[in-house]
Every structure is written in structure tokens, then in C-alpha cells.
Amino acid sequence: MISSLARLTVRAWAATLLAACALLPLVESTVWVLQAALLLGVQAGVGAAVRRVPLARPLTVAAQVVVTLMLLTLMFAREHAVAGLIPGPDALRFFGQLLEQGGQDVNRYAIPAPLSDGIRLMLVGGVLVIGLLVDMLAVTFRSAAPAGLPLLALYSVAAGLTDNDIEWLWFLLAAAGYLMLLLAEGRDRLSQWGRVFAGPSRGRSGETPGAPAPARFGHRIGVVALGIALVVPLALPAMDGGLLDPNGRGVGAGVGGGGTISAVNPLVSLRDSLNNDDDRAVFSVRTEMENTSDLYLRIVSLDDFDGTTWKPSKRAITQVPEGFPAPPGLGPDVEFTEVGTSVSVAKWYGQTWLPMPYPPSRVSVGGDWRYEPVGMTLVGDHGQNTRGLTYEVRSLDVRPTAEQLAKAPEPPADVLREYTELPDSLPSVVHETARDVTDGAKSDYDRAVMMQDWFTLSGDFQYDTQVDVGSGSQAIARFLKDKRGFCVHYSFAMASMARSLGIPARIAVGFAPGTPQADGTISVAMRDAHAWPELYFEGVGWTRFEPTPTRGSTPDYTVQDVEDNGPADPARPSQATPADPSAQPSQSTNCRADGGDPGSCESESPQAALPVDGGGPKWHVVLLWALAGLLVPALPLSPLLWRTRMRAVRLGGHGRTEEDVAPHVLAAWEELTDTAWDHGIVPDESLTPRGAADRIVRTGGLDGDAAASVRRLAGAVEQVLYAPRPRSAVGLADDVRRAAAALRDSASRRARLRALLAPRSAVRVVWAVSDRWATLRDRLVALRPDWHLPSRERG
């Protein structure tokens, strides 16, 4: 018979897995649950094996910790481990990097998030840690009630992050797992508690019903823990993300049209978006703009440089006006047209700010939005975000000329004062570099173009998204020295240099132009996330520049001769996009059209280049994933399914010859004894069939037809065992079903549920495997007597 410790180990594993189901809504894929279940089973099996040695309890836990770490190493860091299994310093550093990446992914993605390696490590590793604690408390230290605390922690974390209509289901699963542990501990009569952990007694009339003291104590702990599980998630705050974080939260304060928005730091989120291997589409855009290379979707502007980072100033917000006022600084002599743009946002991307072309003149959008007049942006109030929205934006396509920009008068004093402010800690090399690069310029416009060209053409800068964002003024100095970085570095450096020359500057964050599609739309993806400087010119207003090489598009007003049809400089960003998008895939400006230099056509992140076989996923891969998906509900139901199958086989059709009588009678008897076992009447092989029948009738409280059926079946068994020619028996299957129904009727609801979902007789599967192993071992030993194989015993 399976030991009580082994039975409790299995239930601790199941309880942890049930509680882990609360994490399922957090990510898109559920494959991590299968991985966690497998590793959790190995972890529990190691604990069970060590406890049978036996070792001291701390050594048992230590062995499980070592095996758990090796399992995680094998799954996530085998290339960095010794022999692919033993975690060394490199593997531990890689774990740290994965966890950091996972934390960034949690802040960047909305729920459900994609299953990145970092998030998968956090999920699987977290479940293994909880499983280790549950196994240690409930099995190793024989104290099941406190094991509810780690289960509570696992459920509470998930409940605090998710926001859907089925939280009750995850709570029910977690609660069922915990109560299963409590009931198992009492029923298995752990020696430290000494009493049956069960409900009211079904014994003789002289016994006093009621749960023993330890059972009542465990039930109280269970009730308290489950009560806390309901209350704690209400106090957990939701996770706020960065500026580009798809899980953005509302930042409006107050009620109605007023309130303020506070500063945020989008830098890490922007870099991670550019390095994102999962380059999913964020927007589908349709626009009336002729030159779609100028279609930048602007989220917010960063105008406050405090010496640590650039960020948006704290601004007042108001009701969204019917029509927006004219953008600041735009004069009547500058040509512009009003164009319409329709934006459809992916359902997974929940941005707090509303991405729009600049400057907007009118917005038609549903939801609770507020208007920030200085930056001409819309921000969600009270949790409003863009997830799944479709909205219309009317905006101005401003087309200044180089001459108008060169002749722009001096900006107003308040604009100069606010947008040329720099911290005292800014290194002098920033101003010195700006002065050297713009030597000989005759206007602020000339200085801006010379700085842009220095970054994109003549300065030998290299675009690299792997460079750290950095913080503080020294980060700009390091970038100017190393000349490697991505859009954040280029825009920050150019804006700081412009301010040092007295040119008002700020930084816009949003999305660069996306990829034209055959249907006339434009697809904007995560790696189109971008930052660019905006410089102020009186009479034109805030004007976009593009200092980042190979990114975005160079504005026409910064190109001296836009009619020049000579060969394009590959280092300069693209200058235009055809008005009519081609159905053919677009090619990078850095790639050779003949494909002669494949290395030059790599994506910004090499890991983002997925293999293409033209046929989609292989059929066998799809089949394997489908089978894996079926295993998730099948695993906890496997005892029920096995028991149903065995009952059908034992009580099914059989032959009518004399040779068929004995197998049929013994199968029916085995089904009866297993049914009684499932309801708590453990088989006693020392009893005769008649004695076993009397014990089932007495303990199960059977009478009438049910008792007669049990005794009739026992008589048939005695005929098979002792009579020289046993008589053919008729109606044995009906006798078994009649007795089983009576056992169910006399059992408590909890006992009936246990007999259905977790039948004790399912242990026969383990015995069968053990017997087959013993047979195989004997055959191997017979072939090679010098072999010494371990044996297995039931217990």
C-alpha cells in the first residue's frame, strides 16, 4: 500500500499546481504550467526519495534546493552551466540578467503578456519556490496548516495583478488545494497529530460525533487563511508602468476637467521596446498625409532636464476641447494643410497617453481623456488607456521652408527662459562640442542642421540599442565620446547641445513612421518606438529634427537640395516614402537589393530575426502543442478517468464458458473491494471473502438489498476459490453497482467527492508499474548476474 507520506507528497504537489493556476491570466501562453508541473513533480519526488532514506529534515530540504537549482539551470541556463547542469558563476549571472529582463517585461507589457524567457523564469521559478515551501511544511515537517501561507502568497500576487471576471475560479482552485492538504493530513493520521482529520463520525451509535480538536484547529486555520486570501488582493496596488509601457495607468487627478499630470521616466521602456524580440504590431494607421515618412505618432514631450534625466514637466490638464487652439509659434506665412488620420490600437497595448501626429487640431476618441495644452497631448484619466481603441485625429501637416526657418526671429522671453534651461552639472564638453560642430553657422537653423548632419553623417556615430541609457549629465558626455547609442542618446545630446547654444529645445517620445501595407494602411510595431528632438522657431513653432542615423526620416526642410536625384547616402535616414504603398516588402536603406551582403540586412536585434520556412508551424509541432494543452485538464482528472475505465472493463461483457467464470467473478469482487476502498474501507487480505463482505456491510452501514448483493458476490468468490467446478454466476455486475450506490449514499459529501476525484484505489497504477519494473529487473539480472539493480517495494 502507498505510504501516507507519499500520499501527502502528491497532494502537496497538486495543491501548489492548483494555486499556480491563478497565474494563468498573466501571460498569453500556458506552456509554462506544464513545465512547472514537471519540475515540481521532480522536486517532490526527490523529497519523497530522500525522506525514505531517511535523512535529517534540513538535509532533505537542502537536497530539494540543490535539485531545484539544477533543474532551473537545465531549463534556462544550460549553455552557461558546467556540464550543462551544474550552475556556476556564469549561470548565476545569467539568471540575474533573465530576472532583470523579466522585471522589465512585466513593467512593459499589458496583461496578458507574451511569455518571454524572463517572465517564464519568474513564473516557473516562483512556483518551484512555493512548491518547495509547501512540501517542506506539509510533508517534511508534518505541519500542513501553515503550508497555506505560501499558497496564499502565490494566489494573492496573481489576484493583485489580474483584473477579470473569473478571479473566483482561481480562488476556488487555490482554496481547494489548501483544503485538500488539510484533509489529507487528518485522514492519513500523521503521528504528530494522532487523530483522524475528518468530519463527523459514522461509527456506532455509542460514539460521540464531532471533529477532534486538531481537526477543528486545522479548519480554523483554513478559514482564516482563506479569509485573508479574499481581503489581501483588495489592498494590493496595481503595477504602474513606464511611458511606453502597454500597461499604463491613468494619471489624471481630481474630478471633472481639472487635475495635473506628473513626470515619468520612459527611457528604460523605450530601450526595451527597441530590443524587443517580439516585434508585435502596435497600431494600424490610415492617413490622408501625402508623405507618410513624416507620420510620427507623438505621445508626450520631455521638457524638464534636471541633471539626472529628461522628463515632462508637471502640467495642468483640462477638458478635451472641441477644436484645439493653434499650436504655439505657428505664423500665418507658413504653409500647412489639415489632414485626417485613423489609428487602431492593438488590444494588448494599454498606453496612458494618446499617440497622435503633431500638432493635433481635433480628436474624436471614446473614453475618459484629458487635454494638456502646453504639449497638446491627451492623457487618460482614472485608468483610461488606449487598449483596443480606434480613434480619429485631425492634425496640421506643417511644411516650412529652409528660408523661413533661417529667418525666424528670436523666440519670446518666456520660451527662451523655460526651454533653454540646463543644469549647472552639465559637462562643459557639451557646449564646447556644440560650438565646434556649428562653427561658421549664421542662424539657429544652420546650427540645428549642422548638428543633425554631424550625428547622422560626418560624426562617425553608430546606432546601437544595446548601450545603457545612463543617467545624469555625464551620460551625454560619455555618448559624445563613445559615439555609440540609440535614439534616446541622440535626441538627448542634440537637445542639450541646442539649449547650450540658446535654441529652445525639448524631446518628443512616441513612434517613428511604420511600414506601409498593401491595403493602404501603415503598420507601426514595438520597435518603431522612437525619441527625437523638437526645436522652437518663432513663426513655425516646435519643429522636428532627426539626429538618429538609420532611423526615422530626415525632414525635407533640413535638406539643402531636395530635388537632387543623385545616389542617396546610406547613413542618412530615409527622406521620403511613396504616397502609394507598394505591395512588395520594403527594403532597408542599409541593405543591398541583390542580397549580396546578407549581414547588412540584419534586424536591429539579431534575436528578432525568426526563421522563415514559408509553411508556418510544422504539423507535428502543432500536434505536440495540442496534446500538451490537453494534458493540463487531464492530469488532475487522470485518477477519475482511470477509475472509470477500470470499472467499465471489470463489469463489462465476458464469455459464457466455464473458463470465463473465474475471471469474471474475481473482476467483480475486485471492483467491489476497490469501491469500498475509495470510500475509506481499506482492504484486509487476511480476511476470507465472507469476512471481507461482513466488514464492508458493517463499516459501510449497508442493509437490505445492498447487503445481500455484497454477500452474494462473496459466495460467488468462494465458489471460484474452493469449489471443484464453480457454478456460473448471473447478475454480479448489478450486485456491484447496487452495493456501490449504497456506499455512496451512506458516505458524507466530502467522502463522495474524494472517492470520485481522488480514488484511493488508483494506487494500483503505481503497483502495476512497480511490478513491471520488478519483472524487468529479474529478467535483466537473469541475463547478466553481475548487474545489481535497485529494487522497489510498496509502501
Image (spheres, rainbow, N blue to C red):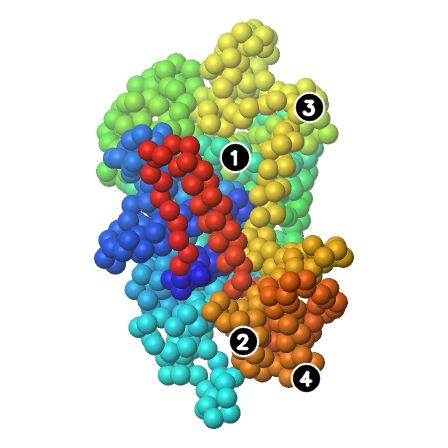
Viewer-side label of 2, 3: 2
Give the residue at x 61% y 69%.
718
Task: From the image, state whether disc 1 or disc 3 is nearer to you.
Answer: 1
Q: Is the residue under label 2 in contact with that under label 4 (CB below 8 Å)?
A: no
Q: What residue would you read off at disc 3?
A: 581
- Farthest front residue in view: 724
Q: Nearer the viewer, residue 542 or 740?
A: 740
Q: Nearer the viewer, mark 1 or mark 4?
A: 4
Q: Earlier in the sequence, mark 4 or mark 3?
A: 3
Distance from disc 1 to disc 3, alpha carbons, whole Å, reads 25 Å
Mark 1 or mark 3, which has the lower sequence index? 1
Disc 3 on helix, strand or loop?
Answer: loop
Element class at badge 1: loop
Q: Answer with the quarter of the image where residue 335 lies.
A: top right
* Element assignment for label 4: helix
Q: Position of residue 784 (x, y in %)?
A: 38, 32
Q: Which residue is mark 2?
A: 691
Q: Give the labeled residue for mark 4.
A: 704
